Image (cartoon, rainbow, N blue to C red):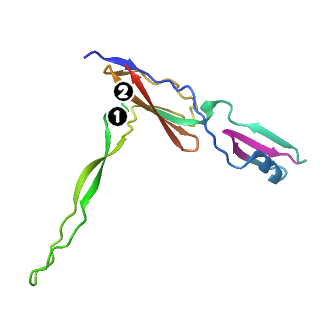
Amino acid sequence: MKKNSVAVELTDFSVFYSQDSIAHAEATLKNKGSKIVVEKGQIVKVSKDKDGIVMREQLTQHWTDWIDYWSVDFDFENKREIIRVQKSPAGQGALEGLEAPQMELPEYEEVWTGDYVFENEWQSFRTKKDRKLEMISVSQEVIPGRRKIAVKVVDIFGNDTMTIVEVSV
């Protein structure tokens, strides 16, 4: 069977966090103090100088500033998420004369949760020394047909978001 290849480009990411407000930070900040505020998806450093003059510095300049790590699963639905659940609760055996009770071991069965396991097949992440991210994944050989590709993004606060895209190759 002939194989083709597919690559993924991360073109956008947005957050809508708010933590505190700029107005509140300005009102409660002491002279020569500063505070980091997250408002409407932007990180802003609010500072007051020794004379009480307030300054704002927007720390997020581009949508990529929010991304710490991103990864791709090129065939998301190829591995079902299976869990083991107890079939029947453990029971106790009957006493026969002076014999010790017999314990029945619980039985388990494997059940599909309806979801799939994300397999991290490619990734790009920042380090302290190298702050750049690759925005296009490697090209992955795939068998032609319909498939679902999952893209997971972890932001600078450690929150992860996943998007699943259906493609035809």
The quadrant in which residue 130 appears is: top right
Front residue (pair 46, 79): 79
Q: Eyeballing the image, is 30 above or below 168?
A: below
Residue 156 position within the rendered picture, expressed as x and y whole percent measured from the top left:
58, 41
Residue extent of the magenta highlight = 36-50
Q: Main secondary structure of the magenta part?
A: strand
Tag of residue 77: 1
- Residue drawn at the location 78% of the way across and 50% of the way down: 24
Q: Quadrant of residue 45?
A: top right
Q: Check disc 1 and give the amino acid type.
A: Glu
**Amino acid beneath label 2:** Arg
Residue topped by disc 2: 147
Q: Residue at x 77, y 49 (%)?
A: 25
Secondary element type, mark 1:
helix
Instruction: Single out the residue that lies furthest toward the top.
Output: 2
Q: Earlier in the sequence, mark 2 or mark 1?
A: 1
User: Where, quadrant-wise, is the N terminus in this rendering?
Assistant: top left
Mark 2 in CB contact with mark 1 (< 8 angstroms)? yes
